[in-house]
Image: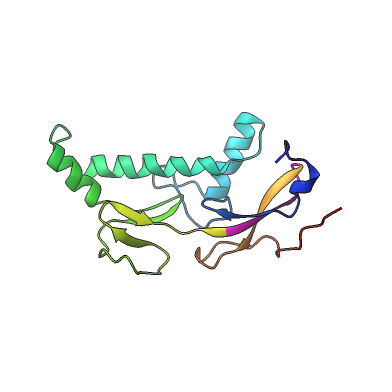
Amino acid sequence: MSAIGPIAYGLTTEISWHPDYPYKSSLTGQTCKEIAEAYEADTGRYWSAELIFYSLMEVFVEALKNTANVDDKEAMLAGIVGVKLETIYGPVDFSIPVDPAAQTEVSHPVPNCLRMPTAGGQWLKGEKWNYEKYLVSNLFVPGAQITKKVTEIQYS
């Protein structure tokens, strides 16, 4: 947002991951907020939504735990299909029935694919950083803390 400048204030966006999500790491027990704070402390930069990819490692580790023989492709697939855990992205459960029309927090529209929760955000002048993404809608992420009310974008 720094590259865009002050005209970025008020832009709205979908949020696939946010520090105010109510989830914890299945690997460390850290909350989303703790992970974001550690990232900022380690890098000196604002947290990034790309931290969501941490959840892929959580799923991978769980799949390995579920796999009887990692050299057997069928056993590895069974390990993946057996994944059921909470990640920093939300609950991952490949055991729920496949239903392309499901409108729940997490759904299983096709085999080997989950539809995960997404919230609404807005870029505003921050308290710690020049630009911060605030959570303004939690309709599909129950328990996520709304941190600001959505505001109209200000045009100059």
Viewer-proximal residue among 42 and 137: 137
Q: Is residue 11 above or below residue 38?
A: below
Q: Is residue 27 above or below residue 97?
A: above
In the rendered view, does 25 fall on the left or right side of 75? right
In the rendered view, does 17 fall on the left or right side of 113? right
Counting from the top left corner in percent of width and height, residue 127 is at 77, 48
Viewer-proximal residue among 41 and 153: 153
Q: Which residue appears farthest toward the front when viewing the image?
A: 156
Image color mode: rainbow
Residue 126, visible in the rendered structure: no
Residue 78, visible in the rendered structure: yes
Counting from the top left corner in percent of width and height, residue 14 is at 57, 55
Give, as a single range, the part of the protein colored magenta. Answer: 120-129
The residue depicted at 55 percent of the width and 61 percent of the height is 144
Viewer-proximal residue among 151 and 126: 151
The residue depicted at 40 percent of the width and 69 percent of the height is 103
Counting from the top left corner in percent of width and height, residue 110 is at 28, 58
In the rendered view, does 106 fall on the left or right side of 78? right
Counting from the top left corner in percent of width and height, residue 31 is at 51, 49
Helix, strand or loop: magenta stretch:
strand
Residue 23 located within the stretch drawn in magenta: no
In the rendered view, does 43 fall on the left or right side of 53? right
Viewer-proximal residue among 156 and 49: 156
The residue depicted at 51 percent of the width and 52 percent of the height is 16
Q: How many marks?
A: 0
Q: Quadrant of the N terminus?
A: top right
Residue 121 located within the stretch drawn in magenta: yes
